Image (spheres, rainbow, N blue to C red):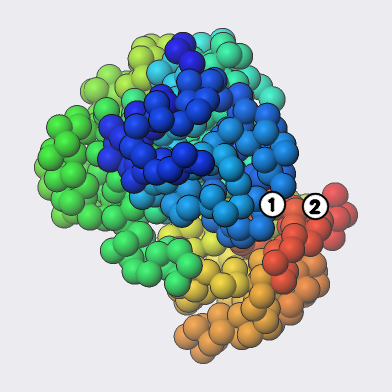
Amino acid sequence: MSAFTIATAAQLLERHHLLREIIHTGGWTLDASDVPGADNPIAAVTYDTRTVAPGSMLFVKGRFRPEFLDGIDGRGLAVYVAENDHSDRTAAPGLIVDDVHKAMSLLSAEFYDRPQDELTVIGITGTKGKTTTAYLTQAILNAHSGGRCALFSSVDNCLDGHTYEESDLTTPESLDAFRMMRQAADNGMRYLVMEVSSQAYKVHRVHGLTFDIGAFLNISPDHISPIEHPTFEDYLHCKRQLITNSKTLVVNADCDHMQLLRQDAAMADVPVAQYAFLDGTDGNGTDGTAGTDSRSGARDLFVAARPDPHNRMGFLLTADGAELGPFELAMPGTFNIANAAAAVAMALKAGVPATDPAIHAIERVSVPGRMERITAGGNLVVYVDFAHNYLSCKALVDEALRAYGDRNPRITLVAGSTGGKAIDRREGIVKGADGRAEAFYFTLDDPNFEDPTAIAEQMRSYVTDPHAETHVIVPREDAIRAAIEDARRHADRFNVVLLAGKGHERRNIINGKPVPYEGDAPIARRLLGL
């Protein structure tokens, strides 16, 4: 590796048409050789002024206040990268750029010696199912490689194939992502599976990163708000960037806007491998062979899943026309079968032979807070799931009816929604259950600076079923208790209580701060005496 210096950084930025000028004590220039110390190696990269040490490169981004730079020269700042001149606060040279987020991604990759080139990198996007699919894919690749697959997910990060630590973002900041990639590569990892959010492209967290395999699971309106995506078009546009930044695309044949996705891939000369769950209701039969579909036109499925006629909870997989055998997941839900098909398609494209027993590793996967089923005997079952938008909430209710529809279940939904963002989720969550849930309990779920009662009442207003009971109980534990007690009062019916939105999370964001929360599953188990 050649030394990473101010000079090499400037050259990289110039090649990508990001560099505006270099500001230093001797003047303004485009020639890094004019800057004293331009060939000295950069010792560290950071976007936090509190961690600046001698020889550091600082990225000035986000909610930055110029006074953060006061006294920073005494700590040895070597150079800063920013969209504005800060020479009034520091004598360190500044690389002034058009977009500091793009610059940070490119420069961080170079500082960490391009660890992505040492890994097979798989990126997964979609409105629903990214986390589950990422865990399923990692399981196959770990089994195939002897535990050499890293993971970046909204639940956990794993850099050594077996140690999982809670994550902060669905897709890490670019600097953190490349730092963790370097650690994973140094740990001997051969693969990396990562979730890629719409925000990752909106704010350039994966700028310049090419995925060996990209997966597009599904799309429906989500994250629509003034601080996220102003429109669905913008949301979908950001998601679509994964396609042109992948070498191979794995896509759900039943995905909305399929024609547009395929056109993206064709224009970028990206080969496409389709997968689907064939339940026999779309005119394609259940044999995994080619057919037609109203959304995707002629099907040419690389991987097909279909119900197992001998196992109500199981399914059969076909890859390139070859039978892979029967499977049964630890996590229920037909949507998880589709996620499993996506995971198998990605693993095969990553080089895992279809005959490798590693494919069956998907059967042992469980993801915290994803379709977690809690039973206590009698006529009551509780599901804990991260469902927090229309598509995921609809799928959660679909699964309750698929599993227990023959018992005429009484379905109760406990849900809230976030404050200050993704405003469309409030109606979407209700829409996913309206007309099928007999009782709703609207409650707390990361209200931030909004009034949680107002959010809950707004959600309540979207219930159109005149026969449904609706309740607003803001303390989440109290809402769960009330829902379970209500289910027990209806013991003459089979009851399914759906705790939606929090999943594995153990905190609520209130007034800008995380407030500890016991968690939906622990509360449910305690109330059920488990």
**Number of numbered discs overlaid on the protein picture:** 2
Q: What residue appears at the point 52 percent right and 25 percent down from the top-left corner?
A: 37
Crowd tier of the residue under label 1, counting other residues whose Cα lies within 10 Å: few below 14, some 14–19, many 20 or above: few
Q: What residue appears at the point 46 percent right and 11 percent down from the top-left corner?
A: 1
**Residue 468 to residue 212: above or below:** below
The spot of residue 134 in percent (x, y) is 49, 35
**Residue 369 to residue 210: above or below:** below
Q: What residue appears at the point 45 percent right and 64 percent down from the top-left corner?
A: 228
Mark 1 belongs to which amino acid? Asp
Closest to the observer: 67 or 274? 67
Horizontal arrangement in the rendering, residue 340 relative to residue 152 (left or right): left
Decide if residue 460 is in sight here.
no
The spot of residue 527 in percent (x, y) is 84, 60
**Residue 10 to residue 5: above or below:** below
* SS category of the residue bearing label 1: loop
* Picture disc at residue 522: 2
The spot of residue 529 in percent (x, y) is 87, 54
Where does label 1 land, which residue?
Answer: 70
